[in-house]
């Protein structure tokens, strides 16, 4: 049975496989790093010592330890990981020749209720050095399939200050219902379609959807985290990472087919904030900031979905740019490393408690069952009941195969 909804958890910057799901305790210290490992609830599977809560959910996860690609930059690595396709030259964020993101593609095949977005992103855009990154959008599917960017209504930065931009949709605007309706009526009187109405219709669709949500819908109710059981809310903890995970659960439960969460300890701050790009102080940053938030947020999500009986029909997909280098640099950090890295899937018919593929003894390359981003995407699409070999046509009626990989045997 296909999954009914999907939550994509993106670790922007490149989470270290050594310090998460593929530790190398038997390697030399300059490779294995400062952390030890712990047992999980699945015999034979070990995680980093700083994922103690997640280790109790290993029986729900299929961990792929043999992912690889050839893109060493954030922009290119993120694009390959989030779209499943190698990046073309000259990437730009809103180029309509780009491949669609996984969230956009999954949303394309769903049929949500009126006024409900096909896909939502939380809680901010992904940037690299202040530049908006390509890959998060609908690409050649068209702007109507761009996942809507939504601000998480609460949650502090973890030991820091959260800074949003003005681009996020905030459903907590204190606007009177009659005032919104009057604005819509005035707009309808003033605006007229001129010539080809295609772009107007697309823009008007987003306006109408935003108005529907503001006027009252299941999505707006889900957005109000004050309505959540205080015990559940506390389980996710009061930081932007945890509250974004909680909002993702509430939105998908309310009928949004797919929600993508940019999972960090705080705000990306244009790519220079609290993210997984640990060139400096890798171990300090992971131990004190990133891994605690990630561990608590993800374990809370798994627990919450399981308690509600939603895990089997909710696919949880983890993505990241790439892994980190075997060699620890002079700044106690690890650099970009696309030659091998680890990611995971859970729920949605995926058989948990398993490892697919492996890296070599020092975590430098795939050893068994190498896996491309396309293969990983094909697996996620299959779990959602979508044929990865299907073709769709772009806005110019040109056919595109949605995925170039083969599903992994994780079901």
Image: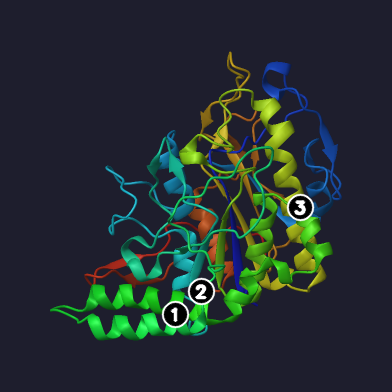
Q: Secondary structure at mark 3?
A: loop
383 w.r.t. 90: above or below: below
Residue furthest to the left in view is 195
Q: Earlier in the sequence, mark 2 or mark 3?
A: 2
Q: CA distance from mark 2 to mark 1?
A: 7 Å
Distance of label 3 from label 1 (alpha carbons): 34 Å
Q: Is residue 58 above or below residue 272?
A: below
User: Of helix, strand and loop, which one carries label 2?
Assistant: loop
User: Which residue is tagged 2?
Assistant: 175
Residue at mark 1: 180
Q: Local crowd at mark 1 within 10 Å, few (<14), some, or many (≥20)? A: some
Residue 259: percent from the left, percent from the top?
Answer: 56, 64
Instruction: Give the foreground label among 2 and 3.
Output: 2
Crowding at label 2, few (<14), some or many (≥20) Cα neighbours within 10 Å? few
> At 31% from the left edge and 72% from the top edge, which residue is drawn?
203
Q: Residue shown at 67%/53% (left/top)? A: 155
380, 306: nearer the viewer: 306
- Please name the residue that numbered disc 3 is placed on: 237
Q: CA distance from mark 2 to mark 3?
A: 29 Å
Residue 269, position as x, y percentages in the image: 50, 40
Q: Residues within 10 Å of mark 3 (few under 14, many from 20)?
A: some
Residue 279 visible from this viewpoint: yes
Look at the numbered discs 2 and 1 and tell me whether their residues touch, using CB distance below 8 Å: yes
Q: Which residue is at 76% across, 49% downward?
A: 296
Lateral position of residue 6 relative to residue 20, left or right: left
């Amino acid at each position: 049975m296909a999954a009914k909804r999907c939550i994509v958890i993106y670790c922007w910057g490149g989470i270290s496989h050594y310090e998460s799901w593929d530790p190398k305790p038997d390697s030399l210290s300059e490779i294995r790093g400062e952390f030890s490992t712990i047992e999980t609830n699945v015999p034979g599977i070990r995680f980093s010592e700083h994922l103690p809560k997640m280790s109790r959910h290993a029986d729900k996860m299929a961990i792929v330890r043999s992912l690889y690609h050839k893109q060493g930059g954030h922009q290119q690595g993120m694009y390959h990981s989030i779209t499943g396709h190698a990046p073309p030259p000259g990437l730009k964020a809103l180029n309509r020749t780009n491949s669609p993101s996984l969230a956009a593609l999954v949303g394309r095949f769903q049929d949500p209720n009126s006024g409900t977005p096909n896909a939502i992103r939380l809680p901010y855009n992904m940037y690299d050095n202040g530049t908006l990154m390509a890959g998060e959008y609908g690409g050649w599917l068209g702007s109507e399939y761009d996942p809507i960017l939504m601000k998480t209504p609460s949650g502090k930065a973890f030991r820091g200050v959260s800074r949003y931009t003005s681009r996020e949709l905030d459903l907590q605007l204190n606007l009177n219902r009659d005032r919104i309706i009057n604005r819509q009526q005035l707009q309808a009187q003033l605006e007229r379609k001129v010539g080809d109405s295609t772009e107007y219709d697309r823009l008007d669709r987003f306006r109408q959807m935003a108005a529907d949500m503001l006027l009252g819908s299941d999505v707006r109710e889900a957005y109000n985290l004050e309505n959540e059981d205080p015990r559940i809310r506390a389980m996710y903890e009061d930081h932007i990472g945890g509250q974004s995970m909680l909002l993702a659960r509430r939105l998908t439960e309310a009928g949004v087919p797919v929600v993508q969460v940019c999972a960090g300890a705080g705000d990306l701050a244009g790519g220079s904030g609290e993210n997984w790009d640990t060139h400096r102080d890798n171990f300090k940053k992971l131990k004190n900031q990133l891994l605690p938030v990630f561990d608590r947020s993800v374990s809370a999500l798994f627990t919450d979905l399981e308690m509600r009986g939603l895990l089997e029909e909710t696919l949880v997909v983890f993505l990241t740019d790439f892994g980190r280098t075997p060699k620890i640099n002079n700044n106690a950090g690890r650099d970009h490393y696309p030659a091998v890295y680890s990611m995971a899937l859970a729920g949605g018919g995926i058989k948990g408690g398993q490892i697919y593929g492996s890296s070599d003894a020092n975590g430098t390359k795939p050893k068994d069952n190498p896996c491309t981003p396309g293969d990983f995407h094909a697996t996620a699409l299959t779990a959602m009941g979508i044929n990865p070999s299907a073709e769709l046509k772009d806005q110019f009626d040109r056919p595109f195969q949605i995925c170039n990989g083969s599903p992994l045997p994780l079901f």
